[in-house]
Image (cartoon, grey):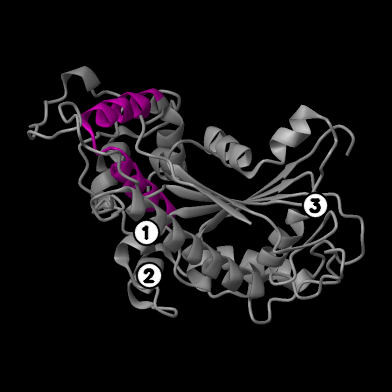
Amino acid sequence: MFQLMFEPEQALTCGQVDASLAPCIPYLTQGGEPGAACCSGVKILKGLTQSTADKKVACNCVKASANRYANLKDDAAQALPTKCGVTMDTPISRNVNCDARKAQKKSHLDDHTSITRKPPLIVPAENAIFFNGDKIEGTGNPVIERLSDLQKIAEILVSKFGNSINAWVVEAPVFNEPFAVYKDFIPSVNDYGEPKSYDADGYPASSSIVLLLWNCLKEAKNVISGKQKEPYQAEVSTSSSSTPRTLLLGFSKGGTLLNQLVTELGFAPVQLTEDMCLANKNVTNGGFASPQQDQIIPNSKDGFLNSIAEFHFVEVRLNTEGAYVTNHDVINRISERLAQGAPGIRFFLHGTPRQ
């Protein structure tokens, strides 16, 4: 079972602005040249600031963020968009007067005067993919029942990561009574969904996820098109040239799938930001070739693996042999990726006192 939650265009938040520019902090405080992840964040920020209201919000958020860093270099901040090859109406500076910015020309159908304009489905800044675990039913506990609802999980993801994400919730394709069995993703699992080991051969998890995302997106487009008189079209910013970042969350046994993806990531070829843009334009991968769709989800397993920015292990406590990544070769390969210039990856462990 699969739940996709598209968020319509909403007000920009400082959290989104800070997240976009976070990779730029080393450049802004130390100088030098901005990295690929920094420039990708600048492009994402431009894509998020299409309306006059959002540009003003972004200006104030950037100014507030800049004032938190006493060692921020103003000349480096002002030069950042140019160094990244981006033309921005939102200045990156602590000294700008956001209220005195030159008013932009408005069309007859701008976002302040249009009454009939439908809220577009915007290209996400990030895709948050949540892999669920074993089923827990009939507990009578309203909290547990609520967190067993896929729609509620999607809403929680959006509340945690912001309105600029697309939230995807995935359940195991097979259940053996209450036990989730991710057999298509982890070939070594037994009848109870417990993996014996992790192997990157054939890239089963990443390949299955890309196919799943594309089939779901296709179905979502068909549903949306059936409800609208005009053909469905995602709003694509001309500045958003790279695939959105991917945030992975594994709850309980869903954490085993994250371990499989860590293994596959270790053996995947490194794609820098510019390489990923080119790959998205060239890879058809069985007919996946729409430029607009390329900017919503990755269109290949390599593109997907290289878009991963965060792993969140939520209440993972499977206590069986083979359930965790202990292969030193995999761990070393992850380190080698970073040495080759791949974007950094963050790992989060979320637990409770009983753990």
Task: Work out how far the residue at label 3 is from the one at label 2, CA to CA, in angstroms.
Answer: 35 Å
Q: How crowded is mark 3: few (under 14 residues within 10 Å), some or many (20 or more)?
A: many
Q: Residue 121: where, in percent of width, then height?
A: 35, 46
**Mark 3 or mark 2, whichever is nearer to me:** 3
Q: Residue at x 43, y 41 (%)?
A: 7
Residue 272: quarter of image: bottom left
Q: How crowded is mark 2: few (under 14 residues within 10 Å), some or many (20 or more)?
A: many
Residue at which label 2 appears: 280
Q: Which amino acid does label 1 sit on?
A: Gln
First in sequence: mark 1 vs mark 3: 3
In the image, residue 352 above or below residue 342: above
Q: Residue at x 31, y 59 (%)?
A: 241
Q: Do the residues labelled 1 and 3 touch (CB within 8 Å)?
A: no
First in sequence: mark 3 vs mark 2: 3
Q: Which of 147 and 293 is in front in this view?
A: 147
Q: Residues within 10 Å of mark 1 (few under 14, many from 20)?
A: many
Q: Which amino acid does label 3 sit on?
A: Asp
* Region in magenta: 35-64
Residue at which label 3 appears: 134
Q: Residue 111: where, in percent of width, then height?
A: 20, 31
Secondary structure, magenta segment, majority class: helix
Q: Are marks 1 and 2 in contact (CB under 8 Å)?
A: yes
Quarter of the image with the N terminus is bottom right
Task: Work out how far the residue at label 1 is from the one at label 3, CA to CA, in angstroms.
Answer: 32 Å
Residue at which label 1 appears: 295
As for residue 61 lying within the magenta part, the answer is yes
Q: Which residue is drawn at 55% across and 65% down?
A: 212
Horizontal arrangement in the rendering, residue 63 relative to residue 151 (left or right): left
Can you see residue 35?
no
As for residue 132 lying within the magenta part, the answer is no
Horizontal arrangement in the rendering, residue 270 relative to residue 319 (left or right): left
